[in-house]
Structure formats: C-alpha cells, structure tokens
Amino acid sequence: MFILSLTYVKPQDEADRLMEPHMAWVQHGYDSGMFLASGRKVPRTGGVILASGERADIEAFVADDPFAVHGVADYDITEVALTRTADGLEGLKG
C-alpha cells in the first residue's frame, strides 16, 4: 500500500481553480481500483490518498494529476507494508 501525501506549494485559490479537474482525476483513480481512500488535510494544506498497485504505475498516475501538472502541489509517496489492520480492513494488507 502507498500513502500519497500532497502539499500545496501555491496559494489555495490556485488549488481551488483546479479542484474540479483534480477531483475528476481522483475519481479515475477510484474507478481504476488504484485509490482506496482520500481526503483533505486539516488544516487544508493539501491532501492524502491511500493507494494500491505498482509504484511505477502510481508515480505515472500522480504525474498526470492537474495539481502536479500545474505545479500547485508536491507529492510525497511512501510505501507501507501493513502487518496489522482493524477488523474489516484486512484487504489493505495486500
């Protein structure tokens, strides 16, 4: 599993301007089965996505995010080898 942590590097109004295409990109991640969960950071300085798949595929997909294309956010991609989960989340261990 991977944790995709994105951090805004431009003003929030630029992120707001690209939110609709970014959310379409997020939906595509869910439709493909790559994304497992996502949401905004609090305070709103970016977001976090839980993803599964091959690192190279995830990196290529992230490069197509409108936030990345337009330099609005930087991504940090961390691979996690889960060993324990709460009941019902065993599928995250992949």
Image (cartoon, rainbow, N blue to C red):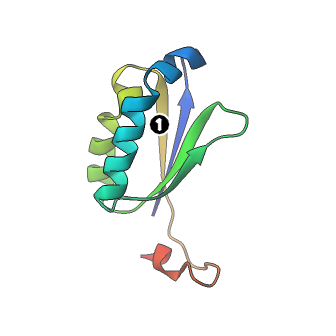
Q: Counting other residues with Cα less than 10 Å from the Cα at mark 1, is it few (<14), some (14-19), or many (20 or more)? A: some
Please, is residue 48 above or below residue 32 in the view? above
Residue at 42 percent of width and 20 percent of height: 71
Residue at 48 percent of width and 73 percent of height: 92
Q: Position of residue 37 (x, y in %)?
A: 51, 58
Q: Quadrant of the N terminus?
A: bottom left
In the figure, is residue 5 to the left or right of 18? right
Q: Amino acid at mark 1?
A: Tyr
Q: Give 83 or 71, whichever is nearer the viewer.
A: 71
Q: Give 30 or 69, whichever is nearer the viewer.
A: 30
Give residue 59's quadrant in the image. top left
Q: Position of residue 38 (x, y in %)?
A: 52, 51
Q: Position of residue 35 (x, y in %)?
A: 41, 57
In the figure, is residue 83 to the left or right of 56? right
Residue at 57 percent of width and 82 percent of height: 88
Q: Residue furthest front?
A: 20
Residue picked out by circle 1: 75
Give residue 18's quadrant in the image. top left
Residue at 62 percent of width and 85 percent of height: 87
Give residue 67's quadrant in the image. top left
Q: Quadrant of the C terminus?
A: bottom left
Q: Position of residue 31 (x, y in %)?
A: 31, 57
Please, is residue 79 above or below residue 70 in the view? below
Dot 1: element: strand
Q: Residue furthest bottom?
A: 87
